Amino acid sequence: MQISQTARTPLRTTLARYAPRSTAFKPPAPTALQLITLLIVALVSLPIGYLVIRAAGAGEAGLAYLLDGRTLKVISNSLLLTGAVVAAAALIGVPFAWLTARTDLPFRRFWLVAGLLTMVIPSYIGAMMYIAAFGPRGLLQSLLEPFGVQSLPSIYGFWGAWLSITLFTYPYVVLPVRAALLNMDPALDESARSLGMNRWKVFWRVTLPQLRPAMATGMLLTALYTLSDFGAVALMRYDAFTRVIYLQYTSSFDRNRAAILSLVLVAITLALLVMERLAARKRHNYRIGVGCQRTLQPVALGRWRIPALAFCGTLVTVGVLAPVGVLAYWLARGAGEITMDLLHPALNTVGASGLTALVVGVVALPPALLSARASSRLNRWLVQLAYLGNVLPGLVVALALVYFAANYLPNVYQTLPILILGYSTRFLPLSIGSTSSALTQINPRLEEVGRSMGLNSFQIARRIVAPLARAGILAGMALVFLSVMKELPTTLLLSPTGFVTLPTEIWTAHNQVQMSRLGAPSLVLIAVSALSLFIMLRQEKHD
Amino acid sequence: MQLKRIARAASCALMLATAALPLAAQNANEIVPVPLSGETLTVYSGRTESLIAPILEQFTAETGVQVEVRYGNTAEMAAVILEEGDNSPADVFIAQDAGALGALAQENRLSPLPSDILERVPAAYRSDDGLWVGLSGRARVFVYNTEALSEEELPTSILDLTDPQWAGRVGWAPTNASFQSHVTGLRLLLGDDATREWLEGMVANGTIPYDNNRAIVQAVIDGEIDLGLVNHYYLYGFLADDPDVPAANYYLPGGDPGALINVAGAGVVNTSDQPGLAQRLILYLLGQNAQTYFAENTYEYPLVPGVEPSFQLIPLDELEVPDLDLSDLSDLQTTLDMLSETGALP
């Protein structure tokens, strides 16, 4: 007995020595990472927690308000708008992605870039432009006036909100669907063709089912955006959640109602995510067995080329040319008439966005490391919680922070740090996602090599991990920068007194019906957005 | 490779360089001479920036006291002060109407003003308890499109607007403090039930909601609507730019509840740690300079005797208005609930 035991022990050690190690780079102290992440989660969720307390404080009156017909109307309005936008975005996005990815459409690259450009136009600027162009006594109507057109159907309400949000969100569908189309195995299409299906049947029964996961991702993003968008529904006077919450907040003494509505909105958003997860479980779309994909052959459009061009042309005209055209017209009309200070709003905007990008870039590291390197059930939960900002509309975050800071943080209330905290809560997930995917792509063997050469954890982090993950981290930060710059509701509610940014300038100018003051800040905002998007895409290409 | 490095370095540098900016730029948009005292007042203003900012800048220029202004909806700013409680950074609250000031006074959030401030304006335009004072007067009027309507076709009472002939032709601003105060006035004059009935009738008639008075006047000029419920002075801003705009004000006759006079006013927030300086600002706003500004630049009624209103205006004492004490307009909460219940506010 004794002999066998002693004999077994060295054997086990020997085996262990040769067993592959699952993670080479153990974070210095996982518990420290967990603690930091926990702290971040606490910081992100505290104000929301306070919102719950606040809503609960409304008691029976709150419950009555929750079940009131008007609240139900708001819920149905929001759901209706979300459904319509998602459907329209899919109907535009999928064909557009297919045309630009898989066909011989002339100037494909141009259409793609022009079509995606709508992403840099904030929805509130878009909505303002549509009101100016298609609204009562707007530009279109004045063009049609010589032909006896006295009035156009009203742009306000559902259709205006639907139009502006759809046109500025369909790229969320285009991007994943396009990626899926480019990665698709052509053998499936070819097999279907060889089995006697025509082009349409192949598209419906082979291509489309494979696109479902990508479409689901895009449609989920669109739905989340629609629920959280504030500018477009407010300007189009459509009583969706964000507009009603904002009106309750700005024109009522009863602050609890805004809190209650905010929580209902968060609940609906969460339900949407859960539904998507459940649906995603049933999907299997991968290639079984080894094989080599051939390059895709572009589909010849033939006589469909003209309608296809007309489709892309209309999209780009309505989505990009029309808004930018109206802006340029206002700029020209306002030039010389009103002198305005653009420099400070621009510096404030870029400054606050840059600061947030830096903060978020650093703060995202612990949760990203945790998510990439040390997976356990607890860690996964922690990381999921850090993603909370994803489902919190900017207006809700801002509202929660106003309440929370006014009552408990008087020293930082109405200061830049609170504004940055608001932005960070909202956009932290963008950075965590990008950073953790960069970290997972680093081969742990490289770190092992470093360790075997005598580097300590800090040196490994600095000399091996940081250079390799840098591109991903920077991409995440750039995305945050871009998002913060366009952000409206958080900026409106949380800006320090006297802190003017481009979005607040635009909002104020519109509120005071000073359209000639709108052109310049809007164009500057769009130009800076486009520039940072351009830098981002360039980076992506080089990396 | 080289390009990529440069692009990266540039974007890094951009982020770093810009990060420090907001701290520097925060106060930079106020043009200020060397401040004499180095003191700063925080003002919460329910009045629009374009109307009040110029005179606050003059105050700074003359006294060296910096003024930091937070702009917002009047009810919003009042609610923010209530929410902030003891932590409120606000020294002075400037409101668009007497109602919000009254509501704050009722919650004991304003400190009493000295009599030398109060007595500058007639008793009708200040708080009975001396907690707030009116700065400028405004009349509630109809603004109408002169191409769509002649004066004879206009209704003689605000209550007539629920008539089907006005369906979809009228605009109002339910989120606006002046409008809300007017509804409080209607409640006092007509009673809650009649006011509720009127609001319901207006909503049923498809009255179009706008964000503020300015947007209503613009919509009337554009012919988007034929008639709007506004304060009198917004029109004159448009007329100053273009004397030919097809819009005119209509003062309801015979003391109709639609013809209310209200004030924009100010009070010192009771948690202010510099009430003296706060009072100094209010005193300045009641001075010759500021009152003339209100008369000539915003076309409001100056409230300090001796300063004449703009020649375009019917003098304040010639207006036929119902008898109402502005201090009684403080029950804003009930008005807001009613607006919400009738669907005027979502």
Image: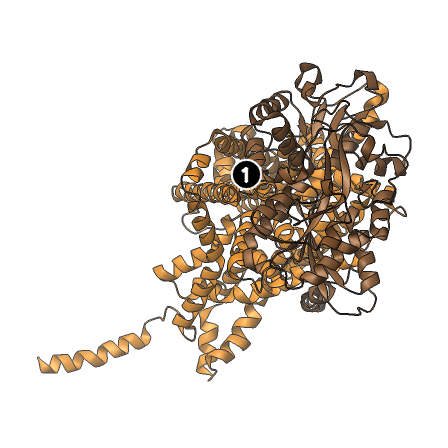
Q: Position of residue A321 (x, y in %)?
A: 76, 39
Question: So how many labels did they put on this image?
Answer: 1
- Looking at the image, can residue A380 be seen? yes
Looking at the rendered image, the quarter that the C terminus of chain B falls into is top right
Closer to the camera, A187 or B213? B213
Q: What is the quadrant of residue A24 in the picture? A: bottom left
Looking at the rendered image, the quarter that the N terminus of chain B falls into is bottom right
**Colour applied to chain A:** orange
**Colour applied to chain B:** brown
Q: Residue drawn 84% across and 39% down?
A: B237
- Looking at the image, can residue A84 be seen? no
The type of colouring in the image is by chain
Say which chain tag 1 marks.
A
Q: Residue drawn 85% across and 32% down?
A: B314
Binning the other alpha carbons within 10 Å of mark 1 as few (below 14), some (14 to 19) or many (20 upward) gives many
Q: Is B310 positioned to the left or the right of A100 in the image? A: right
Element under label 1? helix
Q: What is the quadrant of residue B169 in the picture? A: top right
Q: Position of residue B244 (x, y in %)?
A: 91, 30
Check disc 1 and give the amino acid type.
Phe
Q: Is A8 positioned to the left or the right of A298 in the image? A: left
- Residue A101, compared with residue A369, is above or below; it is above
Q: Where is residue A287 in the image (x, y as percent from the top left)?
A: 44, 47
Q: Position of residue B200 (x, y in %)?
A: 59, 23
Residue lying at the far bottom in this picture: please name it. Answer: A454
Closer to the camera, A57 or A125? A57
Q: Label 1, on which residue?
A: A241
- Residue A180, compared with residue A451, is above or below; it is above
